[in-house]
């Protein structure tokens, strides 16, 4: 019952992002800003903190990654206000108020407040508008973010509990659920890096959450290439980090989410069956998922597992591109003007 509840909640959240992209004012632009914020924070955290810092043992890089990972709310608020036309000074002034908040509360606060800020910039006399931003808008921005934080955290933890609960199931069920869920989440603004870090996943579950994501890059490459979501740069970017293309993914959820879930689920079964482990939470990303595995497992086993998962992912990618060949695609050119 809990698994069904968590699955429905996850699908509801992902659907909300897609609806937002299509229907909200400047939704596509805002989603692009959220993707950029995730790369500027979580990607740096995964590579510098978990991979280079902790696994290799370089304290300076651990500190660097930790700093970046803790500024998701600030980065999201600043970037979404910038893409919506708020002046850089006010975007930074108000975005800083979201420091310490999660990336989603910061994003929502920045998105909502940007409309009021643009209105005030037009109506309030120069000089006085700065005072209004400092005295009135800064506290309001922070208040919105703080109010949203418990709701967002509760949602993430509910989804996480389903994933954690699956570890008590059989290896196959655990591989299907964790591998499928996290690979799906890795393509969404929820961020698999953030969720695994929040849950503190280690051992086999963390390995299932990380390695299939790296392998699914093959499926994403084939899918983007065959269905022509964007140009070569977009295709390469989605292989390196899906969050860079969150706007394209949110605009085309069905083919991408379905393909990624199946690829991740099957890859998760392979990882679970081989018993690989990963004791570095937060490394559920294509660029970090494979390298960090060598720190905790024999290199030969990691390479064999990756090879099997990559073959599976490629097959799923070709199958997905064929099944969805007539699906109405929203391209990068349409999204980004």
Image: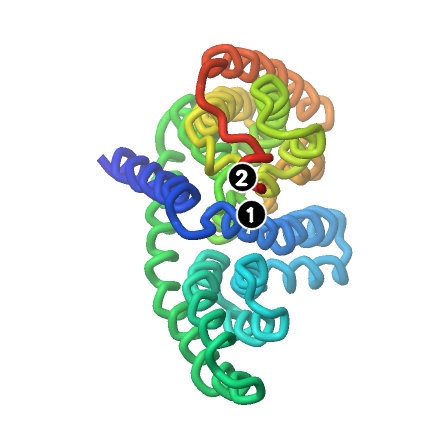
Relative depth, front residue between 241 and 162: 241
| First in residue order: circle 1 vs circle 2 | 1
The N terminus: image quadrant: top left
**SS at badge 1:** helix
In this figure, which residue is indicated by the disc labeled 2? 335
* Gap between marks 1 and 2 measured at Cα: 10 Å
Q: Nearer the viewer, mark 1 or mark 2?
A: 2
Q: Determine whether, in the image, residue 66 is placed left or right of residue 321.
A: right
- Residue 206 location in percent, x, y? 53, 39
Question: What is the count of numbered marks?
Answer: 2
Q: Is residue 138 above or below residue 76?
A: below
User: 10 Å neighbourhood of mark 1: few (<14), some, or many (≥20)?
Assistant: many
Of residues 67 and 27, the one drawn nearer to the viewer in this rendering: 27
Residue visible at 58% across and 51% down in the picture: 38
Q: Are marks 1 and 2 in contact (CB under 8 Å)?
A: yes
Displayed quadrant of residue 37: bottom right
Q: Position of residue 281 (x, y in %)?
A: 56, 47
* Up-down relation of residue 126 to residue 235 (above or below): below
Q: Residue at x 49, y 69 (%)?
A: 118
Secondary structure category for the residue under label 2 = helix
Residue 165 is marked as: none
- Residue projecting furthest to the left: 1
């Amino acid at each position: 019952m809990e698994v069904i509840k968590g699955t429905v909640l996850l699908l509801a959240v992902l659907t909300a992002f897609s609806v937002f992209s299509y229907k909200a004012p400047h939704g596509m632009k805002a989603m692009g800003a959220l993707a950029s914020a995730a790369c500027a924070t979580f990607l740096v955290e995964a590579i510098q903190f978990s991979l280079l810092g902790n696994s290799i043992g370089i304290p300076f890089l651990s500190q660097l990654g930790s700093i970046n990972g803790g500024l998701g709310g600030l980065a999201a608020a600043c970037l979404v206000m910038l893409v919506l036309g708020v002046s850089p000074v006010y975007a930074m002034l108000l975005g800083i108020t979201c420091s310490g908040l999660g990336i989603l509360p910061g994003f929502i606060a920045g998105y909502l407040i940007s409309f009021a800020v643009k209105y005030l910039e037009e109506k309030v006399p120069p000089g006085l508008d700065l005072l209004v931003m400092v005295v009135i808008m800064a506290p309001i921005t922070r208040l919105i973010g703080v109010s949203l934080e418990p709701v967002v955290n509760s949602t993430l933890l509910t989804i996480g509990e389903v994933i954690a609960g699956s570890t008590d199931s059989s290896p196959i069920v655990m591989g299907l659920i964790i591998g499928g869920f996290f690979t799906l989440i890795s393509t969404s603004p929820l961020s698999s890096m953030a969720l695994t870090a929040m849950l503190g996943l280690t051992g086999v579950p963390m390995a299932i959450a990380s390695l299939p994501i790296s392998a699914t890059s093959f499926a994403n490459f084939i899918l983007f290439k065959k269905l022509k979501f964007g140009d070569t740069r977009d295709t390469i970017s989605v292989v390196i980090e899906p969050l860079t293309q969150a706007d394209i993914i949110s605009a085309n959820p069905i083919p991408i989410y379905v393909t990624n879930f199946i690829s991740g689920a099957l890859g998760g079964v392979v990882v679970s069956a081989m018993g690989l482990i990963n004791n570095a939470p937060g490394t559920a990303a294509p660029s970090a998922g494979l390298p960090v595995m060598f720190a905790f497992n024999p290199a030969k086993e990691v390479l064999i597992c990756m090879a099997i998962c990559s073959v599976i992912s490629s097959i799923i990618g070709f199958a997905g591109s064929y099944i969805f060949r007539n699906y109405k695609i929203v391209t990068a050119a349409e999204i980004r003007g």
